[in-house]
Image: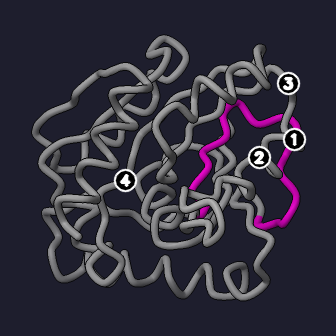
Amino acid sequence: MTIAIIGLGVVGVSTASQLKDYQLTVVDNNVDQLLSFHKRVSEFVQYREKFPDQKIFLWEPKQVTDIPLKNADAYIICLPTPLHETYRTLDTSIIEEYLKQLPQDATVIIRSTVPIGYFKSVQVSYPNMKFGYIPEFLREDNAVKDTSNLDYIIIAGDIGDLEFLTELSDYGRKRIYHVSLEEAEIIKLTHNGAIS
């Protein structure tokens, strides 16, 4: 299975570190992110050396590029969604820019924070795409440790198409919750509000 991870920030790198058994393509339009990718992966490896019982692996991605593959089996989107200053909502425009470039029948897993109702909207715009949502619960300053030590993982969407994502739960997580896309949106935003 070939997986394209779009976005090489904290979430993208930590996600990639957990999917070492797959052919990975990592994608970002930020040159600095592409250039620092291997250095940041090494942070996960150094953590693994300090804590050998944790399952974080070094892998060699198939390709580092700024253009998504057209033939990946799944696309995991880990892009920033900052607060839009004018509209006071999460700005998901960068996600839409990448969705436009993907095959119309793609399997797309989003890890970015999105507003409630987002998936209803993109399912109308892209009716042939299969969507899943695995919200991240990482703290930027502690992402390496958080990647291995989460107590649970939320998986939303068509589980038949996203079965490989349960492998994210094999890394020290105790519980997997399968919920609807809208429930996952609510859980993520509630969590963010509680820790802010």
Q: Which residue is mark 1?
A: 100
- In space, the residues marked 1 and 2 are separated at their CA atoms by 6 Å
Badge 2: residue crowd in 10 Å (few <14, some 14–19, many ≥20): few
Q: Is 61 left, or right, of 153 in this rendering?
A: right
Furthest residue in direction top, as rendered? 160
Closest to the observer: 74 or 130? 130
Residue underneath mark 2: 96
Q: Are marks 1 and 4 in contact (CB under 8 Å)?
A: no
Q: Separation of disc 3 and disc 2 at Cα?
A: 13 Å
Query: What is the three-letter code of the residue carrying label 4?
Result: Glu
User: Residues at badges 1 and 2 in contact (C-beta under 8 Å)?
Assistant: yes
- Identify which amino acid the numbered label 1 is placed on: Lys
CB within 8 Å, label 4 to label 3: no
Out of 164 and 116, give the one closest to the viewer. Answer: 116
Q: Counting other residues with Cα less than 10 Å from the Cα at mark 3, is it few (<14), some (14-19), or many (20 or more)?
A: few
4 or 2: tag closer to the N-terminus: 2
Q: Would residue 7 appear left or right of 178 to someone viewing this image?
A: right
Disc number placed over residue 136 in the picture, else none: 4
| Secondary structure, magenta segment, majority class | loop
Q: Is 69 in the magenta?
A: yes
Element type where label 2 sits in the image: helix
Viewer-closest of 95 and 34: 95
Q: Nearer the viewer, mark 3 or mark 2?
A: 2
Return the x and y of residue 172 as percentages of the image width and height.
Answer: 16, 50
Q: Going by the image, does 2 lie left or right of 9?
A: right
Where does the magenta region start and end?
Answer: 64-80
The residue to which callout 3 is attached is 104
| Residue located 69% across and 48% down the image | 4
Amino acid type indicated by mark 3: Gln
